[in-house]
Image (cartoon, grey):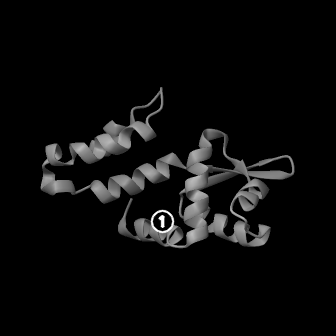
Amino acid sequence: MDISQALTAFAALSQPLRLDAFRLLIKAGPDGMAAGDIATALDAKANTSSQNLAHLVQAGLISNTRDGRSIIYRANMDGLNALLRFMLEDCCGGNADACTPLINAIAPCCESPSKDTSKDLTS
């Protein structure tokens, strides 16, 4: 991730409804949520929710797929991983031991049985 992509991601997350939607989709996991369910959960109008979700898609933080008449949104964990890697790239001046507590604190939430993302954060 370069600085331009990071700024796009941070700009997308800088609006309360978008940040809430992103956190909701992280909580929803790989099944994601339908656009209408997201709007309902966030007590937002459908068109407002849709515009905000589009910003998150453009930033690479979420993805969407059509399922019949619904659009299902999912958190893009690769996008989140890239943003975290960007933020931690120069962590502690190259002293990886100093960053270990931070990485260990966030790693359990991001691990999946098939992939250990904590290794991605430190590579």
Quarter in which the C terminus is drawn: top left
Q: Is residue 44 above or below residue 35?
A: below
- Residue 52 in the image: x percent, y percent? 65, 69
Tally of numbered discs: 1
Camera-nearest residue between 34 and 24: 24
- Which amino acid, by three-letter code, is at mark 1? Ala
The picture quadrant where one finds residue 6 is: bottom left
- Residue 45 in the image: x percent, y percent? 77, 70
Picture residue at 21% right of the left edge, 55% below the top:
91
Q: Is residue 22 above or below residue 16?
A: above
Taking the image as shown, residue 44 lies to the left or right of residue 84, namely right
Could you classify mark 1 by the number of other residues whose Cα lies within 10 Å: few (under 14), some (14-19), or many (20 or more)?
A: many
Picture residue at 21% right of the left edge, 48% below the top:
99
- Residue 58 in the image: x percent, y percent? 58, 65
Q: Which residue is mark 1?
A: 9
Quarter in which the N terminus is drawn: bottom left
Secondary structure beneath label 1:
helix
Can residue 75 be seen here? no
Q: Is residue 8 above or below residue 122?
A: below
Picture residue at 42% right of the left edge, 71% below the top:
7
Can residue 79 be seen here? yes
Camera-nearest residue between 4 and 117: 117
Taking the image as shown, residue 100 lies to the left or right of residue 78, namely left
- Residue 21 in the image: x percent, y percent? 61, 60
Q: Residue furthest top?
A: 113
